[in-house]
Amino acid sequence: MIETSARLLALLSLLQLRREWTGSELADRLEVGPRTIRRDVDKLRSLGYPIEAAPGVAGGYRLGAGAELPPLLLDEAEAVAVAVGLRVAAAGGLEGIEETSVRALAKLEQVLPDRLRRRVSALSQATSAFSSDGPRIDSDVLATLASACRDGVRLRFSYTARDDAKTRRHVEPSALVYSGYRWYLVAFDLDREDWRTFRIDRIPVSPPVRPEGRGMRRLVPGGDPAAYVASQLRRNGGDASLPPGRIRVHAPAHVMAGRLPQRRLTVTPDGESACIVSTIGPWYRGFLVWMATMGERLEVLEPPELVELAQTVAATLAASA
């Protein structure tokens, strides 16, 4: 049995972990009775936490929006993960998030215990990130989509297809996927009665994404959103504006396969001592940078834009040597 003070902290942590809990779920997690949960909720409310309760036998609870953000309860691994994530986010990719990420990171590092602050500082000093050349998206749009995925809320939004056709979509969102170059929304299209993958940079800020009430929670085909998006990109030949990239590496396929992320790249043997590494979906600048760090002799095959970029980077490095 958890003591009262520790139980209150555990209860608050659970309420921050998920949007809504039933009273019985909280009681089971904390190994107490429903009456104890009600008393603990009242105590948290008396401390200023805006906990909302839904009527009925289930007794649902959720942490409501308040005038001030309540303290976040993070374990050591979570604190380090958040700090590293904020530092990477500061490198860009989302409109307007760079400065916000730096401010949030400074606040987090200020309140970390000395031991954790040293760990985060070591990771920060040893880690760097380069900004993506991918299309930038609005952070508010991304946050709205993420909340809808979490809460099972239907959405309506405008969408620009690859042929520039303007459409209105009515979907039940399931997951967000970042390919390393673009952000995608995986959702069930209610008008087309089928799964669709939407590029988030093609969802405009205005008119805004509009919630449409509670929807059905659906599992992405195959159960893995990232694998589903990758398969769709392969089936469609990648993005029309950026085809897949291919590089010949003068190293055996079995050696390179163990060194490369299989979700992003495929490795095909090209004889006994070479292989072809291809992007899953559109090529991106980071693909060239990643391959250059492998320490193997490379031949950039296609597309022409990737070949030209490799020549430009090689010339720049040669001139600065």
Image: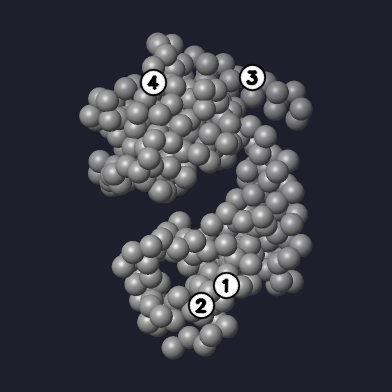
Name which of mark 2 and mark 4 comes first in the sequence: 2
Q: Which residue lies furthest to the left in this view?
A: 193
Q: In this rendered view, identify the residue nearer to me: 195 or 204.
A: 204
Q: Quadrant of residue 125?
A: bottom right
Kindly identify which residue carries mark 1: 44
Q: What element carries label 1?
A: helix
Q: Where does residue 131 sit, x and y in percent of width and height?
A: 64, 34
Instruction: Residue 40: give its label.
Output: 2
Position above or below: 71 against 209: below
Quarter of the image where one finds residue 48: bottom right
Secondary structure under tag 3 reads helix
Q: Residues within 10 Å of mark 3 (few under 14, many from 20)?
A: few
Residue under circle 4?
168
Work out whether residue 186 or residue 59 is closer to the camera in this orientation and state it. Answer: 59
- In the orientation shown, which residue stands out farthest toward the front? 55
Q: Earlier in the sequence, mark 1 or mark 4?
A: 1
Q: SS class of the residue under badge 2?
A: helix
The residue indicated by pointer 3 is 312
Question: Is disc 4 placed on a helix, strand or loop?
Answer: strand
Number of other residues with Cα within 10 Å of mark 1, as a class: few under 14, some 14 to 19, many 20 or more = some
Marks 3 and 2 sit apart, C-alpha to C-alpha, by 64 Å
As measured in the structure, the alpha-carbon distance from the residue carrying label 1 to the one carrying label 4 is 43 Å
Amino acid bearing label 2: Asp
Q: Callout 4, which amino acid? A: Arg
